[in-house]
Amino acid sequence: MMKRFLLASSLVLVLVLFGSAAIAADLPDTGVSGVYEAMVGTDDAEQLTRYFSEFGFTVVAEASLTAADAAKIYGVESALKSVRMQNGDIDSHGLVRILEWEEPLGPGVGYAPPETVGQRMLVMRTEDVFRLDDVYNDLRDGGEPVLAIPPVYDDLYGMTEGTPDFFQRRVGVREMAVYQNSVNHVFFQRYGYQIPGYGTIGDHSPLRTSELTHHDFVISGDIDEVTAYYSAVLGFKPEAEDATIDGDWQAGPQAVFGMVPGSSHWYRGFVSPNNICGKLKFFVPLDQRPDRSEHQRPGEQGITLHSVTMPNLRMVHDLAFEHRLVITPIVENEFGEKSFVIRGPDGSTWQVIEKADSTNQPVTEFKLVTVNN
């Protein structure tokens, strides 16, 4: 299997926009959503609900399970209180589900150096990345275990023309990362362009942030092999046929992942054919990094599960069985939705939910729209 180096940001754009005809032809037509939810384990749902409300998320459903029922659905013998939160009217992707375990299995990956194997990160668009940098640095100054990576500029799509000046301004993003005990984030702010349907910010959000636009996973193993099921079983479209290498020579990855000189990692991304948002991004460090993947499991605290929705659950359950994935029987989850759970070879856990449609229809055409700011 041949992997290749990332040659230019324009190549990424071509692959994201058009992909590979061969790849698309091989995808099972599952109707998969973008990533529907990130699920965060906790022993204090009230505190975590308050936290996410500052980003504009509101409670749209609550439920509870006995220890016996939680064991049937998640394999965790602990009573469970579950809270689903949504940002504005975006209900097709980018939600949060808080899982309050009465008896958590462990602390989760926890506060750890960037690119610790087992880490998961929630990515949101913001209108003011420097405000968020101030907020998290105030927490750190107050004695909280928070590492805020300062905002760094990157021209992801090579859209800046000529030599930037006052009238012909640079185009790109500023992004920052936040590492904490329970929830890790990446925040990005756009300059000079927009992508309709990719990060919607409403007046209801105190911190001027969107739904979850994509999700980062730090994993181990052969990245092509351990992530192959995202296409073969779930129906996600890979950005490229093979993985690429990112490293410290790129401003964004260097800052967000705390790369020391000479560092690099394998990267592979996936997007739903039915939604430009709710992307998945996987990273396998080539350097020696801490490994806390044993704590990356349901029942632990922190980001330990994700979910997707699709109209034909039985089809995907059969595909998962054919590909010898670790799966549970189809049952109703705590919200009365037909679902089952997959444990992938990349160490990620997914709840697959049967859901035919969304009120707010996702955007399926990727467009870069220039704006004058």
Image: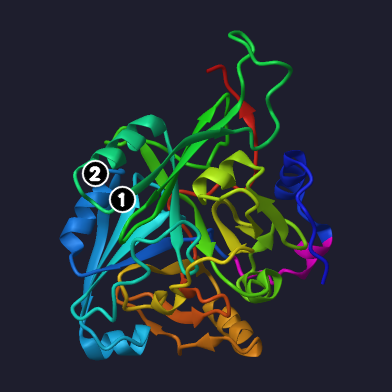
- The picture places residue 195, in percent across and down from the top left corner, at 57, 36
Q: Position of residue 63 (x, y in %)?
A: 22, 71
Circles 2, 1 touching at the beta carbon (< 8 Å)? yes
The residue pinned by badge 1 equals 146
Residue at left 77%, top 62%? Answer: 241
Color theme of the render = rainbow
Q: Is residue 163 above or below residue 69?
A: above
From the image, tell me which residue sits under label 2: 139
Q: Report x, y in % for residue 194.
A: 56, 31
66, above or below 98, in the image? below
For the point 62% across and 11% down, which residue is it?
165
Left or right relative to 327: residue 104:
left
Q: Does the magenta stretch include residue 11?
A: no
Packing grade of label 2 (10 A; few <14, some 14-19, many >=20) is: some
Mark 1 is surrounded, within 10 Å at the Cα level, by few (under 14), some (14 to 19) or many (20 or more) other residues, namely many
Q: Does the magenta stretch include residue 25?
A: yes
User: Which quadrant, please, contains the N terminus?
Assistant: bottom right
Q: Is mark 2 on a helix, strand or loop?
A: helix
Residue 340 seen anywhere in this rendered image of the structure: yes
Say whether residue 250 is left or right of residue 344. right
- Residue nearest the viewer, comparing 171 with 204: 171
Q: What stretch is highlighted in magenta?
A: 22-31
Which mark identifies residue 339?
A: none
**As rendered, which of 8 and 23 lies closer to the eye?**
8
Q: How far apart are marks 2 and 1 (CA)?
A: 7 Å
Name the residue type under label 1. Val
Looking at the image, residue 55 sits to the left or right of residue 317; the answer is: left
Nearest the viewer among 110 and 350 is 110
The answer to which image quadrant residue 97 occupies is bottom left
The quarter holding residue 210 reads top left
Q: How many marks?
A: 2
